[in-house]
Protein backbone atom coordinates (compact mmCIF):
# COMPACT_ATOMS: atom_id res chain seq x y z
CA UNK A 1 0.00 0.00 0.00
CA UNK A 2 1.33 3.42 -0.87
CA UNK A 3 1.22 6.49 1.35
CA UNK A 4 -1.47 7.95 -0.92
CA UNK A 5 -3.61 4.81 -0.76
CA UNK A 6 -3.31 4.81 3.04
CA UNK A 7 -4.32 8.46 3.34
CA UNK A 8 -7.26 7.93 0.98
CA UNK A 9 -8.35 4.91 3.03
CA UNK A 10 -8.23 6.93 6.25
CA UNK A 11 -10.46 9.58 4.67
CA UNK A 12 -12.82 6.95 3.26
CA UNK A 13 -13.54 5.64 6.78
CA UNK A 14 -13.61 8.68 9.12
CA UNK A 15 -13.80 8.18 12.88
CA UNK A 16 -13.05 4.45 12.63
CA UNK A 17 -10.76 2.76 15.15
CA UNK A 18 -7.51 1.87 13.38
CA UNK A 19 -6.28 -1.67 14.10
CA UNK A 20 -3.09 -3.35 12.86
CA UNK A 21 -3.18 -7.16 12.51
CA UNK A 22 0.33 -8.59 12.00
CA UNK A 23 -0.85 -12.21 11.78
CA UNK A 24 -4.24 -13.91 11.36
CA UNK A 25 -4.52 -14.25 15.15
CA UNK A 26 -2.44 -11.34 16.51
CA UNK A 27 -2.88 -7.57 16.45
CA UNK A 28 -0.95 -4.67 17.90
CA UNK A 29 -2.41 -4.31 21.41
CA UNK A 30 -4.61 -1.34 22.19
CA UNK A 31 -3.95 1.42 22.82
CA UNK A 32 -0.98 2.14 20.57
CA UNK A 33 0.22 5.22 18.77
CA UNK A 34 2.38 6.31 15.87
CA UNK A 35 5.60 7.54 17.49
CA UNK A 36 7.34 8.64 14.33
CA UNK A 37 6.91 8.74 10.56
CA UNK A 38 10.20 8.05 8.83
CA UNK A 39 11.10 8.92 5.25
CA UNK A 40 13.63 6.24 4.39
CA UNK A 41 16.07 6.36 1.49
CA UNK A 42 18.54 3.59 0.75
CA UNK A 43 21.29 2.51 -1.57
CA UNK A 44 22.57 -1.04 -1.72
CA UNK A 45 24.68 -3.53 -3.63
CA UNK A 46 23.25 -7.04 -3.91
CA UNK A 47 25.18 -10.33 -3.83
CA UNK A 48 25.55 -10.20 -7.62
CA UNK A 49 27.23 -6.78 -7.52
CA UNK A 50 24.18 -4.88 -8.77
CA UNK A 51 23.45 -1.46 -7.30
CA UNK A 52 19.97 -0.48 -6.13
CA UNK A 53 18.39 2.58 -4.59
CA UNK A 54 14.95 3.48 -3.42
CA UNK A 55 12.78 5.11 -0.82
CA UNK A 56 9.81 4.24 1.35
CA UNK A 57 7.84 5.68 4.26
CA UNK A 58 7.57 3.92 7.61
CA UNK A 59 5.24 4.57 10.55
CA UNK A 60 6.79 3.46 13.83
CA UNK A 61 4.26 1.95 16.25
CA UNK A 62 4.53 1.94 20.04
CA UNK A 63 2.17 0.38 22.56
CA UNK A 64 1.74 2.50 25.64
CA UNK A 65 0.02 0.55 28.42
CA UNK A 66 -0.36 3.81 30.39
CA UNK A 67 -2.79 5.24 27.84
CA UNK A 68 -6.51 4.77 28.34
CA UNK A 69 -8.77 3.02 25.87
CA UNK A 70 -10.36 6.44 25.27
CA UNK A 71 -7.12 7.37 23.47
CA UNK A 72 -7.44 4.73 20.74
CA UNK A 73 -5.90 5.65 17.43
CA UNK A 74 -8.65 6.56 14.99
CA UNK A 75 -8.43 7.09 11.26
CA UNK A 76 -8.95 10.83 11.85
CA UNK A 77 -6.09 11.01 14.36
CA UNK A 78 -3.76 9.00 12.09
CA UNK A 79 -4.62 11.31 9.18
CA UNK A 80 -3.81 14.37 11.33
CA UNK A 81 -0.43 12.86 12.27
CA UNK A 82 0.40 12.42 8.59
CA UNK A 83 -0.82 15.99 7.88
CA UNK A 84 1.66 17.32 10.46
CA UNK A 85 4.45 15.28 8.88
CA UNK A 86 3.42 16.52 5.42
CA UNK A 87 3.56 20.15 6.61
CA UNK A 88 7.16 19.72 7.83
CA UNK A 89 8.58 17.14 5.41
CA UNK A 90 6.51 16.54 2.28
CA UNK A 91 5.57 12.91 1.76
CA UNK A 92 5.61 11.11 -1.57
CA UNK A 93 2.13 9.63 -2.05
CA UNK A 94 3.61 7.02 -4.44
CA UNK A 95 6.08 5.58 -1.90
CA UNK A 96 5.37 2.24 -0.30
CA UNK A 97 4.21 2.53 3.33
CA UNK A 98 5.45 0.17 6.03
CA UNK A 99 4.70 -0.12 9.73
CA UNK A 100 7.49 -0.93 12.20
CA UNK A 101 6.42 -2.84 15.28
CA UNK A 102 7.79 -5.29 17.80
CA UNK A 103 7.31 -6.30 21.41
CA UNK A 104 8.82 -8.64 23.98
CA UNK A 105 7.38 -11.66 22.14
CA UNK A 106 8.13 -10.78 18.51
CA UNK A 107 11.23 -9.03 17.20
CA UNK A 108 10.78 -5.57 15.76
CA UNK A 109 9.99 -5.94 12.07
CA UNK A 110 8.91 -3.89 9.10
CA UNK A 111 5.38 -4.82 7.98
CA UNK A 112 3.64 -4.05 4.68
CA UNK A 113 -0.12 -3.85 4.19
CA UNK A 114 -1.63 -6.88 2.46
CA UNK A 115 -5.30 -5.93 2.69
CA UNK A 116 -7.87 -4.28 4.93
CA UNK A 117 -11.34 -4.83 6.36
CA UNK A 118 -13.87 -2.29 7.59
CA UNK A 119 -16.71 -3.36 9.88
CA UNK A 120 -18.39 -2.18 13.08
CA UNK A 121 -16.55 1.14 13.16
CA UNK A 122 -13.13 -0.51 12.85
CA UNK A 123 -10.62 -0.34 10.03
CA UNK A 124 -8.27 -3.33 10.28
CA UNK A 125 -5.07 -3.26 8.24
CA UNK A 126 -3.82 -6.80 7.63
CA UNK A 127 -0.03 -6.70 7.68
CA UNK A 128 2.73 -9.09 6.65
CA UNK A 129 6.51 -9.05 6.98
CA UNK A 130 8.00 -9.20 3.46
CA UNK A 131 10.50 -12.01 3.01
CA UNK A 132 14.13 -11.37 2.08
CA UNK A 133 14.89 -12.08 -1.56
CA UNK A 134 18.00 -12.62 -3.67
CA UNK A 135 17.58 -10.01 -6.38
CA UNK A 136 20.02 -11.64 -8.83
CA UNK A 137 18.03 -14.90 -8.61
CA UNK A 138 14.86 -12.99 -9.34
CA UNK A 139 16.56 -11.39 -12.31
CA UNK A 140 17.72 -14.78 -13.65
CA UNK A 141 14.17 -16.13 -13.23
CA UNK A 142 12.96 -13.31 -15.50
CA UNK A 143 11.14 -11.42 -12.75
CA UNK A 144 13.46 -8.41 -13.13
CA UNK A 145 16.00 -7.20 -15.69
CA UNK A 146 19.80 -7.52 -15.75
CA UNK A 147 22.49 -8.98 -13.45
CA UNK A 148 23.78 -12.40 -12.59
CA UNK A 149 23.61 -14.47 -9.44
CA UNK A 150 26.18 -14.66 -6.66
Image (tube, rainbow, N blue to C red):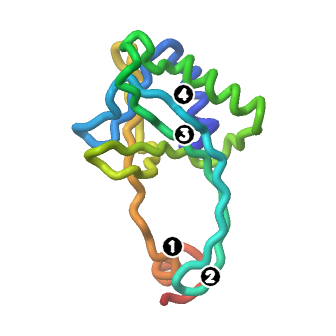
Dot 2: element: loop
Cα distance in 3D space between marks 1 and 4:
30 Å
Q: Earlier in the sequence, mark 1 or mark 4?
A: 4
Q: Residues within 10 Å of mark 2 (few under 14, many from 20)?
A: some
Q: Name the residue under label 4.
A: 9
Instruction: Indicate which disc residue 50 carries.
Output: 2
Cα distance in 3D space between marks 3 and 2:
29 Å
Q: Earlier in the sequence, mark 1 or mark 2?
A: 2
Whole-percent x, y for residue 93 in the image: 68, 40
Cα distance in 3D space between marks 3 and 4:
16 Å
Whole-percent x, y for residue 108 in the image: 39, 50
Residue at x-position 36% and y-position 14%: 69
Q: Mark 1 points at which residue?
A: 143
Instruction: Indicate which disc residue 59 carries.
Output: 3
Cα distance in 3D space between marks 3 and 1:
29 Å
Which residue is nearer to you in this view: 64 or 50? 64
Amino acid sequence: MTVGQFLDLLQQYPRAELHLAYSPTESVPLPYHITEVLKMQFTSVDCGGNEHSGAYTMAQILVNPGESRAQLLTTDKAFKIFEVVQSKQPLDREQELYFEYGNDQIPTARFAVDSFEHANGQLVLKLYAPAAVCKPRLQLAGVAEGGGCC
